[in-house]
């Protein structure tokens, strides 16, 4: 392993939400950062923050991971800088709220591009380098809905089921290497996710206590450092994960539908 001062963690979606909190944890632990997000102004703000508070090097790359070529452009830019990515954090992701047949199909296809295709491409590109070095870690942002049907978030849930299955398969393929892959499985968290998805009036948001993104990030960081295959963040979500192995998919889907419906609370 290289000296920690020379190690870099690349975090997609690292300017807000869980991604920002993950970037903060890595910076607090001495890792240099490569932050990838769409807004250069947001990237500059976070870069100045992390450099000032933690004294780490921060490289910013402004790319829209909704675009198919963006993962390859991110990789090429990192390689052109001569930087080694020791840790890849695939955090960038969004959701769409509403009945599948009533939502814009083009938006839902773009969601698949972001949540699945870009994640897969970035994993492929940086994983090859990690295998060559026989060193590296990858943290994949899944979701508790990867384990249960998610009515009113059907495409989002489907993309996260992919992330979990993909991650678990890679773990097996890499078992004879020193490359670690971990899935972070949060539940509903206090971020801008629900606003972007159009779900700000759902019962999940209005009538339940949302998780603290800083706590989710700490759970993910610690699990990755331990070499865990998967971590479900939060006690309530751990219970829900266990129940997903006991209850029928039909019952699970109905329960999730009730949680996701629009709240009548003001």
Image (tube, grey):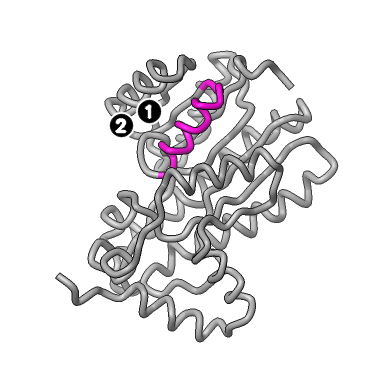
Q: Is residue 110 left or right of residue 131?
A: left
- The location of residue 62, given as percent across then percent down, is 37, 28
Q: Quadrant of the N terminus?
A: top right
Residue stretch rendered in magenta on the structure: 18-32
In which quadrant of the rendered image does the C terminus lie? Answer: bottom left
Does the magenta-highlighted stretch encompass residue 100?
no
Vertical side of 201 occupied by 163: above or below: above
Q: Quadrant of residue 165?
A: bottom right
| The quadrant where residue 76 appears | top right
Q: Where 95 falls versus 145 (above or below)?
A: above
Image label count = 2
- Horizontally, residue 197 falls left or right of residue 211, namely left
Residue at image coords 47%, 47%: 215
x 49%, y 26%: residue? 27
Q: Label 1, secondary structure: give it.
A: strand
* In the displayed structure image, the side of residue 214 where residue 121 appears, left or right: right
Could you tell me residue 82's position as x and y percent?
59, 14
Q: Would you name the residue on which mark 2 appears?
A: 39
Q: Give the residue at mark 1.
A: 62
Q: Position of residue 17 (x, y in %)?
A: 37, 43
Residue at 40% of width from left, 50% of height from top?
A: 212
**The residue tagged with tag 2: helix, strand or loop?**
loop
Q: Earlier in the sequence, mark 1 or mark 2?
A: 2
Is any part of residue 110 visible from this angle? no
């Amino acid at each position: 392993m290289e000296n920690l001062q020379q190690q870099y963690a690349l975090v997609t979606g690292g300017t807000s939400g869980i991604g920002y909190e993950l970037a903060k944890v890595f910076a607090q632990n001495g890792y240099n950062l490569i932050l990838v997000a769409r807004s250069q102004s947001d990237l500059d703000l976070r870069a100045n923050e992390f450099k000032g508070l933690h004294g780490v090097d921060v490289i910013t790359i402004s790319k829209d991971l909704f675009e198919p070529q963006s993962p390859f452009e991110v990789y090429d830019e990192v390689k052109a800088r001569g930087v080694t990515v020791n840790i890849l954090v695939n955090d960038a992701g969004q959701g769409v709220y509403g009945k599948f047949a009533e939502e814009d199909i083009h938006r839902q296809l773009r969601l698949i591009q972001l949540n699945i295709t870009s994640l897969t491409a970035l994993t492929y590109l940086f994983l090859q380098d990690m295998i060559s070095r026989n060193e590296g870690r990858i943290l994949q942002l899944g979701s508790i809905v990867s384990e249960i049907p998610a009515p009113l978030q059907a495409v989002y849930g489907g993309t996260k089921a992919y992330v979990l299955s993909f991650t678990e398969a890679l773990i097996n393929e890499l078992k004879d290497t020193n490359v670690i892959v971990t899935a972070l499985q949060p539940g509903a968290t206090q971020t801008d996710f629900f606003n972007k998805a159009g779900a700000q009036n759902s019962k999940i948001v209005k009538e339940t206590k949302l998780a603290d993104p800083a706590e989710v990030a700490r759970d993910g960081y610690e699990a990755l450092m331990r070499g865990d295959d998967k971590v479900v963040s939060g006690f309530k979500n751990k219970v829900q994960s266990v129940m997903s192995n006991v209850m029928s998919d039909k019952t699970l889907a109905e329960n999730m539908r009730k949680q996701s419906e629009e709240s009548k609370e003001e």
